[in-house]
Amino acid sequence: MSKILVLVEDPETAAGLVSGVEELGHAAVVSHKSAHAWETLEYNRDIALLIMDAMLGGSEGDNFIRRVKGHGVFRDLPIIVFSAGYVGPRMVAEMLEHGAGW
């Protein structure tokens, strides 16, 4: 069983992701803001995956990816980014460039 951090502002979307993660036999930890997610990562070094919303607070998502990938401990942490809305190709390219998976 892996511990997965779900970073999504919308509570309903977070609940759906948590349900899916738990159905697959993993433990989910939810954060609705990047500051809380960062604190969660620092105190839970055993998190195996980050799933996050691309539209997190505008450009906050890309900045968070850079922060995670720029920190030595989390450099290899897999990040899956999703979006329920429109995300332009430039934003996708920037997030991929900074280490996210789409």
Image: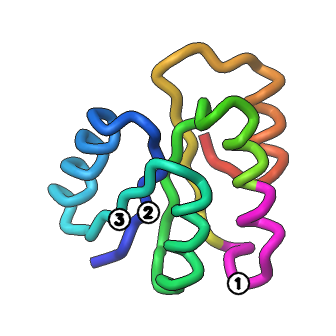
Q: Residue at x 61, y 60 (%)?
A: 35
Q: Is residue 69 magenta?
A: yes
Q: Quadrant of the N terminus?
A: bottom left
Query: Is residue 89 found left or right of 80 in the rendered image?
Result: right
In the image: residue 12, left or right of residue 102 = left
The residue at which mark 2 appears reads as 5
Q: Which amino acid, by three-letter code, is at mark 3?
A: Val
User: Which residue is tagged 1?
Assistant: 73
Label 3, label 1: how far apart the Cα atoms are: 19 Å
Front label number (3 vs 1):
3
Is residue 48 located in the magenta-colored stretch of the structure? no
Q: Which residue is mark 3?
A: 29
Q: Position of residue 11 (x, y in %)?
A: 31, 38
Residue depicted at 51% across the width and 84% down the height: 43
Residue in view at x 68 percent, y 50 percent = 100
- Colouring style: rainbow
**What amino acid type should be assigned to the residue bearing mark 1?**
Val
In terms of sequence position, does the residue under pointer 1 or pointer 2 come before the other? 2
Q: Nearer the viewer, residue 76 or 61?
A: 61
- Determine whether label 3 and label 1 are within 8 Å by CB: no
Picture coordinates of residue 14, whole percent (x, y) = 33, 43
Quadrant position of residue 68: bottom right
First in residue order: circle 3 vs circle 2: 2
**Front-lying residue, 64 or 94:** 64
The answer to whether mark 3 and mark 2 are in CB contact below 8 A is: yes
Q: Is residue 22 above or below residue 19?
A: below
Q: Residues within 10 Å of mark 2 (few under 14, many from 20)?
A: many
SS class, disc 2: strand
Kindly report the secondary structure that dominates the magenta region of the rendered protein. helix
Q: Which residues are magenta?
A: 66-76
